[in-house]
Amino acid sequence: MQENNPGYGGARPKRPSGTSHQNKPREGGNRDRRILSTGNLIDRTDEIKVSKQHQHRKKDDKSKNSSGKKNPNKIAELKALVAANPDRYKRCVIGIDDKGAFYAKIICTSAIQDKITRISISGTENRGHCFRGDEVIVEILNEQNKVSKEEESDDCDAALGGSLPNGKVIGVLQSSNDLDDWIILCTADENNPDMLRPIDRSLPTLLNYKDADHKGKIGHVAVFECTSHQKIRFLKYCPVISDSAMPQIFCVRYLWWRDQDRAPLGAVIGVLPDEEPLKRSMRILRIENQNPVSFRDDVCKEIDSCFPESFEISREEFSIRLDFTKAMTFTIDPPDSKDFDDALSVTGLADGQNYVGVHIADVSHFVKPKSALDNEARKRGTSIYEIGGKEPISMLPARLSADLCSLQEGNERLALSVFMTTDANDDIIKVELKKSIIKSQFRLNYNQVQEVFMDSHSFNSELPSDLQKVLVLLNRISQRWRRQRVGHVEFSRMTNNLDYILTPIAHRIVEEMMIMANHQVAQLLLGHEDFFSGTPLVVHRVPDRPEIDDWRRRFPNESSIIEMVQPLHEEDRPGSAVANDDSIDKNKNFVIHKQVWREMVRCMDTGEWERLQSLILSPEYHPGLIVAWFNLPSFTKRSTYVCSGDHTVENHRHFSLNLPCYTQFTSPIRRYVDLLVHRLVRSCIDRLQGASCYHQSEISEMCLENQSVKTKVGIYESSARNIHFAEFLRVKPLSIHALVDRVTPTGFKLNCLQLSAYLKLWPIDVSLLGARQATAVRNHRRGKVILAYALGIYDLDSLDGPKTQSSQVPEGPVKLNSRRNVFYASIASWKELVFSVLEGDKDRIKSSMDGVTKSLEDPERVMSSGFIEDVSCEGTALQSRGCSVDFTAAVTAGDIVQLQVAGESVRGKLNPFVQLFSLSPTVDVCLEHRMNPGKCFARPSIIQNSALLDRSDRIESYCKFWGSLVVTETVERAVARNDCFLLQNVGVSWLDRETGHLRISVEFCRGRSINIFDDLVEEKDSEYDAVKSGFLGLMCLRYRGVTKPPPETELPIGNVIDLNAAYTWVVHCVATNVTRDEDNFSIHFNLNQSSSSFPEQMGRDFRSQKATLEWISMTQSERSTIKTLLCLPDMYRSSFATSLALSSTQPPELKNLDRAHFEIVRKRLDKIRSKIKGSFDREQESLILYTLGQPFSLIHGYTSSGKTIVAAQLAYRIAQINKIRARDSGVKYQVMCCGPTESSLLSLAGHLHSGVPDLSVVFVYDRQEERKDFPLPEDLTFKSKSLVDEDNGLRLSLGLHHLIRRTNSTDGELIREIDSAISVQPKDVSVHELLKYKSAIENEESKIIKSADIILCFCATSVEKRIKKNTNIKQVIIDDAQACTEVETLLPLVHGSVCQAIICGDVKQIKPRVVSSVTRKYGLGHPLFERCLSESTALLTKQYTMHPALLGLLVPVFYDDKALKRIAVNDQREPGLDFWPCGTHRPFMFLDVVGTESQSPYIKDGPSPDIFNKDEVNATVQICKWLVQKISPEQNICVLSCYEMHCMKIKKHLKGLTNVTVATVNSVLGRHWDYVIVSTVRSLPLSDVKQETDKKWLHNSLGCLCSKNISCTLLSRSYEGLIIIGNKSLLQCDDSWKQLIQHLNKNRSVVDFADFVANRLK
């Protein structure tokens, strides 16, 4: 079974001086490839010469200089440290886990003797400049890291000790990469082309080299070339082309990484060509693996010289070898093999004895030590075999590997033979090693050998009968040897080798012969005193008895069954140890995969006993056993190469083979370690004096090298299989079953069992499964997560109305049967079956199979226990609860789940991915669009066009670029909200391969309260529809039962999975138009993306193929935003918005300036007096007067400077002017006040509502917010509450949805009546009543909006149809505009009558919240307000409300020096509370808490789990409760954080405190409190905190706290006092927080929380 943790690798093969990794043209080629590696390059001219005198490093540097050259003295010093202090210094290999964390895997002697085998490497200063796979010396530090439960399952160290020691890399012994020829594949950002990001995420970002004359070009990457004189020269500039489908990949030559450099330096030398995905993927893989292309010139010359075409083995060599050419010898290899290492023979002797021969090609005769050929073989370490029989990358040239050394049929070849004489019981009684000459008489493949054993009664094979008899004899001997060695494990083999599964007997014969030969050679060498301490061995750590006992306690039933077949401790082996019945809980069931059981029944019926035995005894076929097996500590350990002298005899064992010693001798053509052993064997046979040909230290070094090569090649071959399988899946996805493994609160991993060779363990985040909530079951033995759903699932085949379900549905959410893919059998009956197989009694096996069949659990009993097989809203029992069905699905380790896998290209390489996750037979979750919404529903390639970034006078280009950004952002938000429903059996008509339409019955939708299509029809704007197609909703169509011939593949997967099976075609579309006639809705859509090609069976007939439609809803505001932006060039070309969009200066040139309005302002301004209450001064008054006379104004107000009051004053006065104008003209004009959030607008509304009784103010919420207060029937399940304890007084007083319910009209009464009915019994509200209800709402809204003087709304809501239709907006005021995107700011200005715009904001406060990384990259997060700022922008500098000391704390950090000089403090207040560390006049403090972050198992309105910090929660609650006792009842407190889950946990502890608000930063714009407690949440152990940081690490470690704007918003919400709780050491990694904490330190206001509790809170 392939082992986990592919990041581990030993030392790479040493590269002899003067050699290179790849073979290029002979003339000058070798010299060119080394020019970038020796010494430091001098930045003087465009040609860079290598300077050897600059090969220096600091004294404390690693064992290599900056170019990677070895420093022998330093290496000796490092090794001496380990020898002198082995407990402190360890020889390790660097690895990286799935989360990107570095660790060191111990590879020295203590790796076998010690409990701890892994060391955590935290922080850049501890990591140094090493890379994954480097062999290093690590110093163990004192501190230890706690290990999460997820990590515990990956490494037994955690299970043993619960923590890993921290370490520091102090030197590199051997690089895993050939630094002289290291090509790193990178992508470049067109905005910063000098930063090259490797597609291998484990590597750091590289800097591209710049020479003196070429310092860079915007949007271009400098490309260099190598000359023949050890120089590098500038070649050209290459434009950066961003294309998500086929990314542009640069080939970068690694130069150096000096101590003083934060990043390594490289030089771009080329660009990968565009080619079909499979070729490109394999090219990338080969470059990453540094695969050699051909052999070096000196190797080729040596081959030509020593082994010309006329070469023959000398007669002298024949005379000193055993002539075995007359005996029957044969090879057994794959059909396409060319290098035949081994041959077999067996000869019958007297008295039932047999003479077994294992003949291995004598490569050591041809490859002499220290020769060029030997150096190259040592460097390569092994041969690499490509998929599909392609030419392998051989360790030796073909002249040897496929000719002279290969044991070809009919040719005499030199060999080293192991002859084993056996007695009548097949026990070995004598072993001889001889140099021989053999002639193979038969070249057999595994299929031919397997055919011999297909029928036990006669020989059906075409092979000669005497050869068949020999094969039968060898099979008998190998079976007995195997049984003696490992007992019944001969039938139980964990493997991902499909060839082995298909031809098990043939493979077992060869395998056992090779194992025995290797073992006998190891015994021979270790028995000779000259080789005892210098023999390469393969060891596998023996598990300790405490480890096994702990495992048995965790898995009592499973371990008992496993150990019936394979005893796990030495005392129990070999033999058929059978666990005691008392160790099994007979009340438990044994879980059987249904497919496996059916295969077992088939094998028993057809008499395939070998296959049946394997299915019963092998753990990999049984869910419970495989989970237990993966948790077995010894299983997670690799076998490793070691030198015998480095370990005690007890540690020479190979646990899984159950042998006291083991080496590798049988594959010298393809493994260098075997060649080493051959040389030792030849020395031993020749009885040379002077002991071994190698010193112990040389063997130790080469063992480490070969371990590294073995790991690296294993990863390469696994990745190659992965790529080829992804290519197959790209053409035809497959439906498979997978095992759930390693469940954590936030996710789980999937093991694809028989396909595990091609599909790695997949991590699945529970947030991608579309659940409303995910709850981890605490202390569950295996790990379990319960997913809770509230989902509308409807079936269009139920057109006559809901069906009646006869089954009783339990109260509360129904539970899906998560084990529908398995049977439950009596564990006692299964144990009896296992025992009968071990005994080999076929009659008893049949009887035991019958017993298991009788014990299989009845599916009806599963149903009666409260589980159901499928869910739907169709049926009275379920539908009576509302318009969605509540159900839960459990995911438990050991479950078998159904998936659909497909292929995609990720960073240039093909990769399989989970496309569909099945919850029930008819309900799937599409993980594809949840993982990458932009790819599925948007067109990212439109965004990635830098030409569209240039602002010009073409509004079409502007709208095309920003429209793409908005669409991408919208689809990511929509998918994250998870507001969706399923329609099953939908008939779809495809007009062509890109467009289609479907029909849904109006009666069907209204009968199930599916109102979205009615809403879309009502939103239709005839003017708009004539111009553009819409973007109305997201559609994931899933066609079950699609058939397609499988593509040709070179992978042997057809025998373990049905490649002709039907699959589900998944296609992602965008609805562009919805129409309604009397009977049907017609939905027109465009195909946007599909991972597989369009099936030929799709047609225009609605009935040709029915699909399941997942409709993902967008909000009305989102739809209106996209609609408005797309129509801007056609419908709003002359609008204020268009002028502002195309303006690069402030103010813009306006085409529709209303001069009459400003004339009234000039004449009547002095007669208008404000009635708004609040602080006000002459500076503000003069600014207001000036602004009222300008068509466009920006007002920049610093924190607490009265910016919102100024906006309210402006709104009031403009409204009064509009009234004056209305009296003169008879036309009513209105003011629109917009903002980004409810809190921002409520702050503005509070000022307006307090002093303008003569004006009508209305707050128009978007529909989504309105339905939180007054839900429709379909909303009841999804109703949510705001986290902030808002004062609902203003919402009740000004909210349009509340005002329409207070009218005395007939419509008002109808609205109130139906509201009451919905709240009591939503199901009883008829479709007709709902239509009347919506009509009444529309009528009342129209009246109130038309009568309003001032309209408050969100920017996106301003373009809704009800506002556009019922308003005459003349002026627009936007407050907190720095939190609005550029598009959001433009939306209110598209109204054709707008003649004045006033935009207020503070660029230091929170900016727009952008979800998509793509849109963030291209500027969606940059507000228009910031773009328009200039020196002439009006600035409010005087602050009124914040304590002067708080202002003095924040302004130097978050505002520039100019702002600091201009801010005037207008505050004389009394001293505050007396508990502040630095006195009453400095009301702030920082409480240092080193807490532990946790990811929430809950899913709430977002695509990823939230974060909370339990330690900070407790600290915050303590401080808040204490502060409540200190302040007066009139004062209030707010607890602020960036993370919603953290706030929810704090709020839970603070229930009942009426003057305490708990809020997230996104909901506090415009709001202030007397005292604020900021909980920063993010924390790391001190050892993990970096001294030198980069943006990526900061973002991962601090999250949104890296944003200066978010931090400023968090810290500027208080009037009287501020308390910050956080991890001081981590926060100081950010420059702003570092400056803030330094200021706090100067004021003695940084306090350890524990000290504060001890001294103040007692």
Image: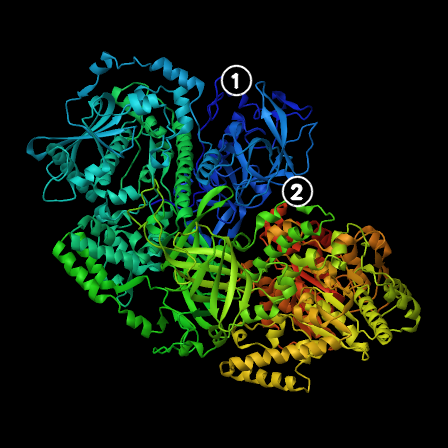
Task: Give coordinates of residue 760: x percent, y percent.
Answer: 41, 48
Give the side of residue 1265 with respect to residue 724, left or right.
Answer: right
Tag of residue 191: 2
Task: Give coordinates of residue 1303: x percent, y percent.
Answer: 69, 84
Q: Residues within 10 Å of mark 2 (few under 14, many from 20)?
A: some
**Res 1485 seen here:** no
Q: Residues within 10 Å of mark 1 (few under 14, many from 20)?
A: few
Residue at point 54%, 74% (across, down): 1275
Give the side of residue 574 with respect to residue 1623, left or right.
Answer: left
Give the structural element (helix, strand or loop) at label 1. Answer: loop
| Camera-side mark, 1 or 2 | 2
The quadrant in which residue 351 appears is: top left
Name the kind of residue labelled 2 in the image: Asn
The quadrant in which residue 1099 appears is: bottom left
In the picture of the structure, the residue carrying the numbered disc 1 is: 28
Q: Residue furthest left?
A: 351
The quadrant in which residue 1561 appears is: bottom right
Of residues 1260 and 1435, the one nearer the viewer is 1260
Of residues 852 and 992, the one nearer the viewer is 992
Q: Is residue 1294 above or below residue 1492?
A: below
Mark 1 and mark 2 residues within 8 Å of each other at the beta carbon: no
Measured Cα–Cα span from mark 1 to mark 2: 38 Å
Name the kind of residue labelled 1 in the image: Gly
Q: How many numbered marks, from 0 up?
A: 2
Give the side of residue 581 with respect to residue 969, left or right.
Answer: left
Give the structural element (helix, strand or loop) at label 2. Answer: loop
Of residues 1431 and 1500, the one nearer the viewer is 1431
